Amino acid sequence: MGQNTLIIYETYFGSTKQAAIRIAKILAEDFNHDVTLHNIGKNQESPETENYDNIIVGSCIYNGSWACHADEFLTRKFEGKNVALFVCSMFAGENSLYKKAYLAYLETILEKHRHIKPISMEAFGGRVPQREYPEQWVMHVANKLPNFTTDNRTIDRIEEWAKQLGTVLENKVIEEVQTI
Ligand SMILES: Cc1cc2nc3c(=O)[nH]c(=O)nc-3n(C[C@H](O)[C@H](O)[C@H](O)COP(=O)(O)O)c2cc1C
């Protein structure tokens, strides 16, 4: 029987949802996981985590922070579960800023939620949908990016990470079986 995996994500304009769906598809199709996707945004109940082997939590980044419901979800206890984290952000999609983004949005969230010990984390690029955002918001991000683009989503990296994660989780189960 496959592993049970819960993917929690929070998105304002869809790029984090897109990443979550991509990850879900790869874990389900290539690694036989039974995957549940849950959008933890506004008006959505926080789901039960008891029946899952793996919990993956993804957030969009606005003004340097995780979205609040995903952040809040990390205060929960995940004893005995494999936890993985990801974010979608414009800076993470820019090569020269990727390391800083990884540090600022992933390492920092671990300092805040010290009980979380993820087996893997990754920061993906993002998209600023200009139609929905007022121009000054777009410029707020644009000013800080050396090569500004409104779309630097990194689909290849999402797929690569999902495959690496699937392999790590598979090996973990094999190790556990071998130690019985
Ligand atoms: C007002 C505003 C603030 C933002 N702040 C940041 C930021 O601090 N760092 C960053 O890397 N990206 C930032 N972004 C870009 C978003 O992280 C990016 O658009 C992401 O893909 C949004 O995810 P979503 O589509 O799931 O909502 C910002 C975008 C806007 C419009």
Image (spheres, grey):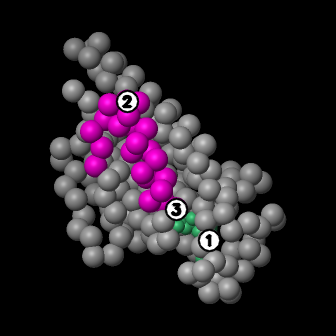
Residue at 74% across, 51% down: 95
- CB at disc 2 and ligand 1 closer than 8 Å: no
Q: Earlier in the sequence, mark 3 or mark 2?
A: 3
- CB at disc 3 and ligand 1 closer than 8 Å: yes
List x then y, in percent, for residue 171: 39, 22
Observer-nearest of 23 and 141: 23
Residue 46 magenta-highlighted? no
Looking at the picture, which amino acid does disc 3 mark? Ser
- Residue corresponding to mark 1: 128
Numbered badge on residue 31 = 2
Main secondary structure along the magenta-highlighted residues: helix
Cα distance in 3D space between marks 2 and 1: 32 Å
Looking at the rendering, the stretch of residues picked out in magenta corresponds to: 15-36
Horizontal relation, residue 160 to residue 115: left or right: right
Marks 1 & 3, CB-CB < 8 Å contact:
no
List x then y, in percent, for residue 161: 53, 39
- Residue corresponding to mark 3: 15
Q: Earlier in the sequence, mark 1 or mark 3?
A: 3
Cα distance in 3D space between marks 1 and 3: 9 Å
List x then y, in percent, for residue 63: 58, 74
* Above or below for 64 versus 106: below
